[in-house]
């Protein structure tokens, strides 16, 4: 089993309830709290490029990076012809991020940070983001909280559309602090009219606020803050999703 090879073609259908406009509104509120040094934004782990598109339509010069060629193919098609500046896309792992120039902000959304299950790789990824950020630039990301991931243990979920059927179960290991999602996917092939079956395994690591704050500080970031889910307030006890912002010193 691999991640996103089969899922890429039906990812948007299964995540139809994600309000990307609301996410972009929230990101822009942070951008406006302290103006960015410029207008170039990296969407790290951009997936199929829905958030990339939303921000590009608002006038940001977007770069999307993701490790999955299949997801990037969907992203490139979705963002084709966008004005005023069409986003560019790079196939890269977070920890090996290598841009052509500097960026003014980096966003990494929808718990993509949790998917980096090796803390050493995540530390390198934070370092690479810091390297390419302009002084005064902002790094914003969110994570599923440890409480949320542990609470998923043993649960089974079903997502269904007219041409997609997905059953997945979650198992959380307290020893490794990793939540594994085992997915069975069925997708209707429009050409043949037949259902095609695929399997995927996704894994997320539970990181504490203290761990992530320490990693950001070690990478060189300053003014590290945490926020509640899509809220301009500190996270509350039991928060399911926690946002982080960090600045590169001028």
Image (cartoon, rainbow, N blue to C red):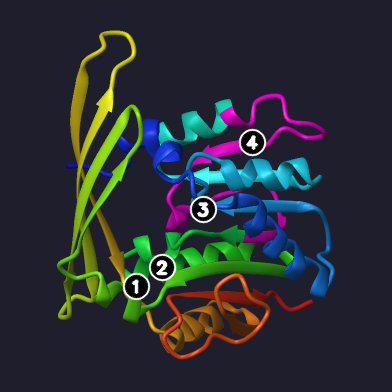
Say if the magenta span includes residue 212: no
Q: Earlier in the sequence, mark 4 or mark 3?
A: 4
Instruction: Point out the residue furthest to the top here.
Output: 192
Q: Is residue 5 at least partly visible in the picture?
A: no
Q: Are marks 4 and 3 in contact (CB under 8 Å)?
A: no
Q: Label 2's element? A: helix
How far apart, in angstroms, are the residues tagged by discs 2 and 4?
24 Å
Q: Is residue 20 at least partly visible in the picture?
A: yes
Q: x, y (%) of residue 17?
A: 49, 49
Q: x, y (%) of residue 217?
A: 55, 84
**Residue stretch rendered in magenta on the structure:** 78-106
Task: Specify the quadrant of the image occupied by residue 9.
Answer: top left
Q: Are marks 4 and 1 in contact (CB under 8 Å)?
A: no
Q: In this rendered view, identify the residue nearer to me: 64 or 160.
A: 160
Q: x, y (%) of residue 180?
A: 21, 61
Q: Earlier in the sequence, mark 4 or mark 1?
A: 4
Question: Disc 3 designates what residue?
Answer: 97
How far apart, in angstroms, are the residues tagged by discs 4 and 3?
14 Å
Residue at point 50%, 84% (across, down):
213
How far apart, in angstroms, are the residues tagged by discs 3 and 1?
16 Å
Q: Label 1's element? A: helix
Dot 1 alpha-carbon crowd within 10 angstroms: few under 14, some 14 to 19, many 20 or more: some
Say if the magenta span includes residue 96: yes
How far apart, in angstroms, are the residues tagged by discs 4 and 1?
28 Å
Question: Disc 2 designates what residue?
Answer: 122
How far apart, in angstroms, are the residues tagged by discs 3 and 2?
11 Å
Question: Disc 4 designates what residue?
Answer: 88
Q: In this rendered view, identify the residue nearer to me: 89 or 26.
A: 26
Task: Specify the quadrant of the image occupied by residue 7.
Answer: top left
């Amino acid at each position: 089993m691999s991640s996103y090879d089969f899922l890429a073609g039906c990812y948007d259908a299964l995540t139809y309830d994600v309000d990307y406009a609301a996410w972009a509104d929230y990101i822009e509120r942070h951008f406006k709290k302290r103006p960015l040094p410029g207008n170039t934004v990296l969407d790290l782990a951009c997936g199929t490029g829905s958030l990339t598109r939303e921000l590009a339509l608002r006038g940001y010069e977007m770069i999307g990076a993701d490790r999955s060629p299949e997801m990037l193919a969907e992203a490139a098609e979705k963002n084709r012809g966008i004005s005023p500046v069409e986003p560019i896309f790079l196939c890269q792992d977070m920890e090996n991020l290598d841009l052509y120039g500097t960026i003014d902000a980096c966003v990494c959304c929808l718990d993509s940070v949790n998917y980096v299950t090796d803390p050493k790789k995540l530390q390198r990824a934070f370092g690479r983001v810091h390297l390419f950020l302009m002084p005064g630039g902002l790094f914003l990301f969110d994570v599923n909280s440890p409480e949320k991931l542990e609470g998923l243990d043993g649960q089974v979920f079903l997502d269904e559309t007219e041409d997609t059927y997905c059953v997945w179960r979650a198992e959380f290991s307290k020893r490794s602090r990793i939540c594994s999602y085992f997915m069975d996917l069925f997708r209707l092939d429009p050409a043949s009219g037949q259902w095609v079956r695929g399997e995927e395994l996704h894994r997320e690591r539970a990181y504490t606020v203290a761990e992530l704050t320490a990693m950001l500080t070690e990478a060189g970031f300053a003014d590290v803050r945490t926020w509640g889910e899509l809220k301009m307030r500190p996270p509350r006890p039991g928060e399911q999703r926690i946002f982080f912002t960090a600045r590169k010193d001028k």
